[in-house]
Image: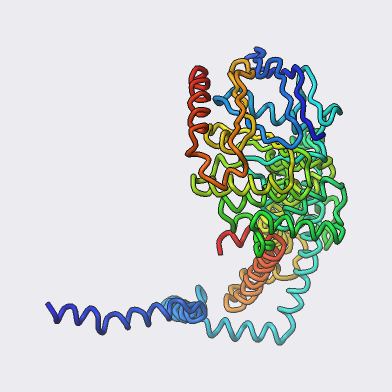
Amino acid sequence: MTERVDRRGGSPKPAKSALAAVAANHYVLATLSLIVFLALWQVISMNVPPIILPGPAKVAVAFVELTLSGELIRATLQTIWPFLIGLVLAFILGTGLGLVLGIFRPAARILDPYIFVFWSIPNIAWLPLFIAWFGVGELTLIVFVFVSAFFPQLLTVESGAKEADSFLVEVARSLGGTKREILHVVVLPSALPYIFAGLRIAVGRALVGIIVGQLLIVATGIGYMFQFYGETLSLAKYFAPLIVIAALAVLLNRGVNWAEHVLVPWKQRAFV
Amino acid sequence: MRDLQFVNVRKTYRSPSGQDLLALADFSLTVDGGRFVSVVGPSGCGKTTLLRMAGGLIPSDGGEIRLDGGLLIDPSPKMSMVFQGIGLMPWKTVEGNVALGLQLQAHRRKLTAEETKRIHATLEMVGLKGFEHYYPHQLSGGMQQRVGLARALVRQPEILLMDEPFGALDAQTRTVLQDELLTIWGRVGSTILFITHDLDEAIYLSDLVVIMGRRPGRIKQVLEVKLRHPRYGYDARAEAEFARLRSIAWRSIKEEL
């Protein structure tokens, strides 16, 4: 009996808390999982033909080679500019029109059916039309990214502006608020989280848009690297643009999260 | 001065089936300046409708509501409302929410130094000193209603309209806030129209308890509470007069249930 109590109170407990301390350290955990991931990748790549899956070392070498030759950097720049221009335009116009439609109901009643139809059409179906209208070039690429990101931004913001709590509107009215003031103190702040929710979807859509666009229209940039190294089965090199796109996506999402944290402080702090 | 008058006020609601429902029929009441008047009654007797009309949030269908003799139609800067649901802006801090009471009253966003001082004095009065930069969700229900009260008081209203302000709070918090409301009322001297369904609360707080009957809403009985002020200075709830009034009021309301 005493022995048991001793054991319980003795060695297992410190061991457990040491493990907990390791688990609590976010960076240690992230590094560990990365090592496990790379090891697994290495083991699998050693057991399949290299043409199917190159190992992480080969990918790293290819990444450095493509970076030093300037190819990867050039492709990244060719991708980032039309992507950013399309996304920023979609964000500004989508947010603006979304707010207008969310606030002025008659405008929404007129335009909503059209927006819904355009939104329902898979955006890839627009591509040949855009090529016919805007030619094979940057402009078509920008328009395609814009269309991909514009509708999710618009629809999310519109529903957010409609979502304003009618009780809060009444409270503002009881305090003497005019229509304009109510817009400012109730409607716009309650739409703000939706602007970020829309942006999160818009970023994802725009990324798909730029890759598909470069694959199918202009044969430049990251999208073209996918096509070229995929078709020539140079898979080690194929992973380099993949890493760039992944990094870009993570960076953008972090950026949106950070901006939301700063501009919508009343939301996150609910979870702290 | 600061009288609030209801003269033959009526209100009809249209039900979904298209029938007219008389919510309030020929309601007449004068709330004298500086007095604390409670309205009690079963749910559906139109007491909240009454308050919302006094606050200018909904129009009446007949009769007049007068404030200091002037007709009252829109929300008046001389009034402040306090709601059961409180209605704090989640994106504003405690200080920002209280400031809103002034900003929407004066229709300008910039506050004068005097107004900023008044905001802080009001926050201190309701016991929120040190919580200026908290967001509403970081506060308990009782604290949130203190913010609601501060937002109303900072406007220095002639009339305070309160719609079951403590209805959603636990009994202990409610008792504390009742006493604080009486203390504040003693200091600011506003006229208070207070809606509740809690008889004890109505008797404890008020000079006058208006009991309403329902369908259609109308005044059934008015009780004058002659317990001396300040009531938190002694155990007013234990007085024989308190028990007497409660038994009369309860009998009156029971007939309406």
Q: Position of residue A152 (x, y in %)?
A: 70, 50
Q: Is residue A71 above or below residue A80?
A: below
Give the side of residue B83 with respect to residue A97, left or right: left
The residue located at (53%, 85%) in the rendering is A57
Q: Quadrant of residue A84?
A: bottom right
In the current view of this chain or complex, which residue is farthest to the top?
Answer: B19
Q: Residue furthest left?
A: A1
Picture quarter containing residue A204?
bottom right
Please state the horizontal and vertical placement of residue A85, each as a whole percent of the image.
81, 63
Pick the front one: B163 or A35: B163
Q: Is residue A50 visible?
A: no
- Number of marks in the rendered image: 0
Q: Name the foreground residue: B105 vs A178.
A: B105
Q: Can you say whether B193 is above or below A198 in the image?
A: above
In percent of the image, x 64 and y 18: which residue is there? B218
Q: Residue B50: percent from the left, percent from the top?
A: 69, 27
Position of the N terminus of chain B by quadrant? top right
* Up-down relation of residue B160 to residue A222 (above or below): above
B141 vs A16, nearest the viewer: B141
Residue B36 relative to residue B235: left or right: right
Above or below: residue A94 compared with residue B168:
below
